[in-house]
Image (tube, rainbow, N blue to C red):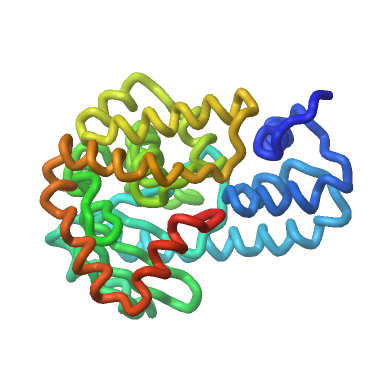
Amino acid sequence: MPKHSLSLKLLNIIHGSHKPREEELPRLAEIAKLNKLYLTFLRSISSDVLQCERVVEEARFRRYVSNVIDVIKTLKDLRYALYKFRKPVDHVSVDLDILIHVGDIPKAVAKLKSIGFKIDVIEPYTVTLRRGGFIVDLYTYPAFAWIVYMDGQKLLRDYSEDIEVDGILARGLTRDAEVVVTAAHAVYKELMVLLLDYITITKWFSSKVIDIAREFAVERSLEIALDLCKAIEQDVAEAPYRIPLPHIARLYLNKAVADPYFRRTALNILRYLAKRRHSGYIVLWRLTRKSY
């Protein structure tokens, strides 16, 4: 078998076309964790060495789903949609992102506080609440550093639908919209594409995805994500893949030209950094980290 990148090898294991050797597992497990595919990886292999790891990860997944169900039951009468939640494979997270109607923010916060959540951070476009180790981020608009990169209220209004979470009715974004959101979040906010992003984009891609990306002025992020997906398939890129620094300024400039939300809120980054004691370290960390 030809030598593949670790990313492609991991994808082949998940798809059932490659059986790893025992000595490969530690490094592949590390790559799976960085790409948010650890549970999927553990479910795809048979290994006595990692059996305990799978038991622990399955328990983490059950706790995650239990917390999600608590939240969606609590918010059932409000205008919300689970955001960056629907994926083609199960994954474990410590937080839950939710798009919420601007008018329902006070009710959502009150309802979550009634089941034990406490407000952690209040920022423009986001309220973060915490219960134990589980975090809920309520977004009115998808943003980073207080810069809006998508119209969250339009997403909520036009691209949400009923879905089921472990048999419980909830509201979530459509699959097409999730692909667009996945690409935009990875490229504009995280400046990095993971294999979980790859799987979401390639498995659920459709012509409708292109239309939605154009509607929200995030087509460049979709183009970049698709190019990276192709590079991973062709075995010439490793994931997580960090967008090269020289491309970032041009990426944001093009976004500002095309998107009035982004343009109007771009200067908010100065206020954002001014309120943080170690802003230089924060910027450096975001540009050099291995994953998100």
Q: Left or right: 152 with respect to 251?
A: left
Q: Is residue 28 visible?
A: yes
Give the image quarter of residue 277.
Answer: bottom left
Residue closest to the eye, 285 or 129? 285
Residue 266, how many percent across, how many down?
A: 18, 53
Residue 118, how many percent across, how many down?
A: 34, 80
Q: Left or right: 94 with respect to 45?
A: left
Q: Residue at x 23, y 41 (%)?
A: 253
Q: Residue at x 67, y 60 (%)?
A: 57
Q: Left or right: 230 with respect to 17?
A: left
Image height check: is 82 above or below 269? above
For this orientation, the residue located farthest to the top is: 207
Q: Left or right: 22 with respect to 158?
A: right
Image height check: is 108 above or below 166? below
Q: Is residue 110 visible?
A: no
Residue 120, how many percent across, how many down?
A: 34, 77
Q: Residue at x 83, y 39 (%)?
A: 20
Image height check: is 63 above or below 162? below
Q: Residue at x 50, y 31 (%)?
A: 228
Residue 148, how many percent across, how many down?
A: 21, 52
Give the image quarter of residue 271.
Answer: bottom left
Residue closest to the eye, 192 or 29? 192
Residue closest to the eye, 291 or 206? 291
Give the image quarter of residue 97.
Answer: bottom left
